[in-house]
Image (spheres, rainbow, N blue to C red):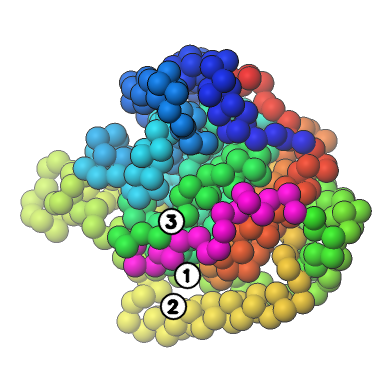
Amino acid sequence: MSESKIYKLHEMLVNKEISCKELTQKYIDAIEKDNGELNAYVTATPETALKTAEEVDRKIAKGEQTGLLEGIPMTLKDNISTDGIKTTCCSRILEDYVPIYDASVWEILKQQNAVLLGKTNMDEFAMGSSCETSYFGGAKNPHNINCVAGGSSGGAASAVGGNLAVYGLGSDTGGSIRQPAAFCGVVGLKPTYGAVSRYGLIAYASSFDQIGPVTASVEDAAIVFDAISQYDEKDSTSQGRKGAPVTETLKNDIKGMKIGIAKEYFDGVREDVRTAVENAVEVYRSLGAEIVYFNLPSLKYALPVYYILACAEASSNLGRYDGIRYGFKADNYKDVNEMIKKTRSTGFGEEVKKRILLGTYVLSSGYYDAYYKKAQNLRGTIVNAFRKAFDSCDVILAPTVPMTAFENGHAVSDPIETYLTDICTVPVNIAGLPGISIPCGYSDKGMPIGMQIIGRTFDEATILNAAWQYENTANMFRSSGFGVKL
């Protein structure tokens, strides 16, 4: 069983077994020692972290009550705005960008005295599945540094899996929290679209993007989700969490729960991944859950629908980076048009340019109906298919990724297979559903295998409870050799 690291550290702090400053310094030292190998962080913030730690120690010394997340060392993906701290999206075009406001999620956590260790690595503008499109080079997998951490929230998963942060916040547009969590053997929660505010998240595809936690255990994911799932008037799509805090319903008996298995989720999945997920199904049977098999044929449309719609939204969202308003600006140009062309050509990486071009193409005159409009209609078909599936089951169980983490450089040599790593995760974003990835086994090379549990909209409580029951029974978490050991 993977116990709650957050709860354990909270108890140590309030019982004065360790000071917050001492705890924070342990993580700062670990980052200095191990980040050179893992490349999980692109910006470290030791001064900010120690300043908050001293404030928490003052509160504890006065006997004041402290919250569960108070004084807990954590990290943010580098597309989450932080006032006064660089937020680069790991792109040359924003290499020196320092926001003048905080994202709502960081505002919430900052008010709770969360200790910010730094900003984590990511695929440039969250576009990628390996973290290798980062302008600063990709994050490495803490279970084998010759393998990728996954993407786009690879730095967050590497930091948590490598014990360089207790938890991190990432963003998930098509699997960008769940896929790296699976690759790095940690827990990744993608909340329902609208459950967590996107205000201050630098946009990739606005109708898909969602912020969520990367943690070492399911209980930690529940604790962080409860904290950040607040209604925010600054985000027009925000609804906040529905119902009671999910931590209050965690650890409930799942006897009689109906767990759905769609055979299409297993098409093209590697044999060791399939076996690990099938073994997890047997664990659920032993816990009294009922397994329901069904077909979900519309899943075959998910990947093309996702790439058409997400790239279309990206081409619109990234239009603001033109060298005029802020960010990188090219030198040596004749006129404004050449300046914008040179700025965008040299400021964006190859993957980002590819997606902007694709998005612009599918939105252009003569192609809009053939691609974008058709993809939107198919999105509705997928949403309805999931709605119908949940008539016969409470949650859906599936692999997170069809394989384990691939070697560094593979994304460049085989980009098609890299895109296919999203095949199991993108349907959740298309439908706006919550999904959680948890470790469910290891390959014969010792690399983590992840499975995901998908739920109805705003039913994070059910998927977290189902995930906790499996985690508590199967005990699949293995610590890496990096970072802080407590």
Q: As drawn, is 209 to the left or to the right of 409? A: left
Nearer to the camera, 444 or 340 = 444
Residue 78 visible at all: no
Closest to the observer, 161 or 322? 161
Which residue, given by chain and number where applicable, does mark 1 sit on? 308
**What is the secondary structure assignment of the residue under circle 3?**
loop
Which is closer to the viewer, label 3 or label 1? 3
Residue 423 position within the rendered picture, expressed as x and y whole percent measured from the top left? 64, 61
Q: In the picture shown, does residue 45 fall above or below 195?
A: above
- Inspect the image, locate mark 2, and give the three-letter code of the amino acid beneath it: Tyr
Coordinates of residue 180 in the picture (x, y in percent): 59, 44
Image quarter in which the N terminus is found? top right
- Left or right: residue 204 compared with residue 466: left
Residue bearing mark 2: 372
Query: Who comes first in sequence, dot 3 or dot 1?
Result: 3
In the picture of the structure, the residue carrying the numbered disc 3 is: 230
Query: Marks 1 and 2, Cα distance to the nearest angstrom?
Result: 6 Å
